[in-house]
Amino acid sequence: MKDPISLTTDFVELYQEIRTCEACFLHKTRKNAVPGEGPQDAQVMFIGEAPGLNEDREGRPFVGRAGSFLEELIVAAGLKRSEVYICNVLKCRPPDNRDPLPVEINSCSDFVGRQIQLIDPFVIVTLGRHSMRRFFPDATISRIHGQPKTVEGRLIVPMYHPAAALHRGNLKATILDDFAKLPGFIDRVRSLRQGEEVLENSKTNPVLKPRQLDLFEE
Ligand code: URA
């Protein structure tokens, strides 16, 4: 399968490892592993749950109905799908789209960690509870959705999964509201980062002080 966007060697190797991974049983039932897609310099990264039927067929994340809705949400947040990075907690489809098992999440965890390291995004949007738990293991999505927190210098924004919003009509307005806040979060992080760069580049100017990402902390 051809990756649509040119990737560095690190990424090509990582995708190759993912596509040939046999660490858990899911490799026996997959058609294609789904590493993820998007530019390597993306500032915003979305992490979903696991490939479904269409994703397994195509080897690309979020290409089914949930994908169309995610794309709508991305556009509503003032972004283009082609400028963000999208991947999942699991790289292979669980049979019948069942929930990921802890052993499967553990098997893929290092892949996700390496994707985060290579992309180095300013903002990570987690989609659904399995993705949220990577950063907030004890949290409940109904309590923290739409509320960003800084984790290891990055802004993590937990959101409901778009598929949940499609299945539970009452969540649709909530996810739309949460995504409407995303441009503001991204702008704040961008300007904080720019401020830090200015500071870095003008060490001679003692007036500028770095503003901390922990402005998002409660
Ligand atoms: N749901 C996900 O979490 N990921 C996909 O790629 C598709 C649906």
Image (tube, rainbow, N blue to C red):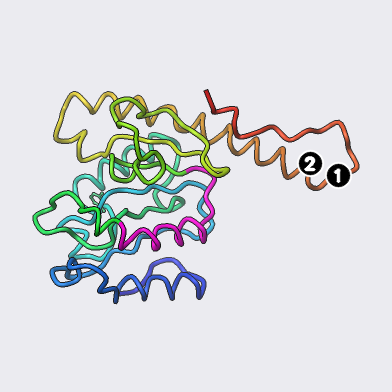
Query: Given the image, on which type of amino acid does mark 1 rest?
Result: Lys
Name above or below for residue 216 compared with residue 195: above
Q: Is residue 201 above or below residue 192?
A: below
Tell me the CA gap for discs 2 and 1: 6 Å
For numbered disc 2, what is the local secondary structure? helix
Identify the residue shown where x is 51% and y is 58%.
117
Foreground of the two, 67 or 94: 94
Q: Nearer the viewer, residue 195 or 92?
A: 92
Is ligand 1 less than 8 Å from the beta carbon at label 2? no
Task: Identify which residue is drawn at 33% across, 45% down.
Answer: 131
Residue 151 on image: x %, y %: 51, 40
Q: Residue 118 in magenta?
A: yes
Which residue is identified by label 2?
199
Using the image, determine if residue 76 lies above or below residue 47: above
**How many neighbours does mark 1 have within 10 angstroms: few (below 14), some (14-19), or many (20 or more)?**
few
User: In the picture provided, is 25 more to the left or to the right than 20?
Assistant: left
Q: Is residue 10 magenta?
A: no
For disc 2, the neighbor class at 10 Å (few under 14, some 14 to 19, many from 20) is some
Proximity of marks 2 and 1: CB atoms separated by less than 8 Å: yes
SS class of the residue under badge 1? loop
Front-lying residue, 152 or 67: 152
Which residue corresponds to mark 1? 203
The magenta segment:
106-123
Q: Position of residue 86 (x, y in %)?
A: 37, 53
